[in-house]
Amino acid sequence: MDRATAWLAVAADVLAQQSHADATDILTAALIARTNAGLVSRIRLSATDPDRIDISVSGCMFQPGPASWPTAAQVRGHPMARYRAATGDDTAVLMPDVLAAGWELDPASKEVMHDLRISDQQLSVPLSRGRAYDGWVLVAEERFGEREADEVRDSQRLLAGLDAHLRILARTRSPVPDPGAPRLTPRERVVLTLAAEGCTAEAMARRLGISARTVHKHQEHLYRKLGACDRLSAVLAAQRRGLLD
């Protein structure tokens, strides 16, 4: 199976999950399997609060508890974060390449890596634009090959779209509806949640990394299942049936 087909299969599996946790497990497992990473960390820095950081970690390498995870300031001081903030480069980048380009590993970063028992074999995968880092960091025991790095770069737009889907799926209410409520797909639940937040089809398309035409198709399916004629009536019908708060 070629890599494009493999990632399409991963996307299909992720989008088919009703549970945010199950969908996330599928995506992280694919990242590990496709790159030979031993550790996958999802890191999100706040663009407004300099002290806020959200981190999740999975993999088969040593995983210290949250008390040992780096602070927002330590992540901002990491060579790859400094490189990205200075250059605006949003492509996946290998840490050895950043170090070779002159972005030195500072003492604080060395201490964090020592405490976490990780090497400099790291692959940064940004998922959004902006100076505050928001993306994956993959860690391996041995050097990543160029094939793995190129595969991740080629898949970045897909990964960003799946990540947006996961973040919105985490906010949706798991279906515990009345007995007569229709069964919605995870993607339909995400579109419904965004509709309830007032997003237009174009805004949904941008956030999910899909076309506006695809959003309209999901909306048509929602309207048919909910017996609605427009976005507002669909949201109200979903609230009545326990599909939305």
Image (cartoon, grey):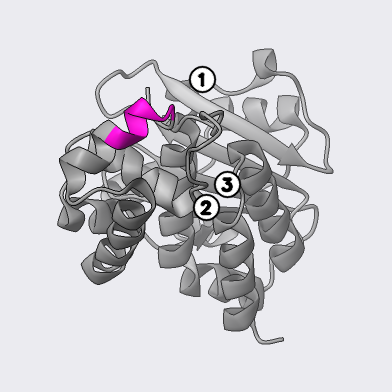
Query: What's the residue at 19%, 55% (across, down)?
Result: 201
Q: Measure the alpha-carbon separation of dots 3 and 2.
A: 5 Å
Q: Give how far across and how far down residue 40 sits, in percent.
A: 67, 45
| Dot 2: element | strand
Do the residues bearing badges 3 and 2 touch, measured as CB atoms within 8 Å? Answer: yes
According to the picture, the residue beneath numbered tag 2 turns out to be 124
Q: Can the viewer see residue 80 in this picture?
A: no
Closer-to-camera residue (221/21): 221
| Amino acid at pointer 1 | Thr
Q: Give how far across and how far down residue 63 sits, in percent.
A: 78, 30
Q: Give how far across and how far down residue 160 sits, in percent.
A: 42, 56
Q: Measure the alpha-carbon separation of dots 1 and 2.
A: 17 Å
- Above or below, comparing residue 160 to residue 10 in the picture: above
According to the picture, the residue beneath numbered tag 3 turns out to be 137
Query: What's the residue at 67%, 35% (across, down)?
Result: 57
| Amino acid at pointer 3 | Val
* Highlighted magenta segment, given as a residue range: 237-242
In magenta segment, residue 147: no
According to the picture, the residue beneath numbered tag 1 turns out to be 71
Q: Earlier in the sequence, mark 1 or mark 2?
A: 1
- Above or below, comparing residue 155 to residue 80 in the picture: below
- Above or below, comparing residue 174 to residue 214 in the picture: above
| Dot 3: element | strand
Query: What's the residue at 17%, 39% (across, down)?
Result: 232
| Amino acid at pointer 2 | Ser
Dominant SS in magenta: helix
Lateral position of residue 119 relative to residue 191, left or right: right
Q: Give how far across and how far down residue 92 sits, in percent.
A: 47, 61
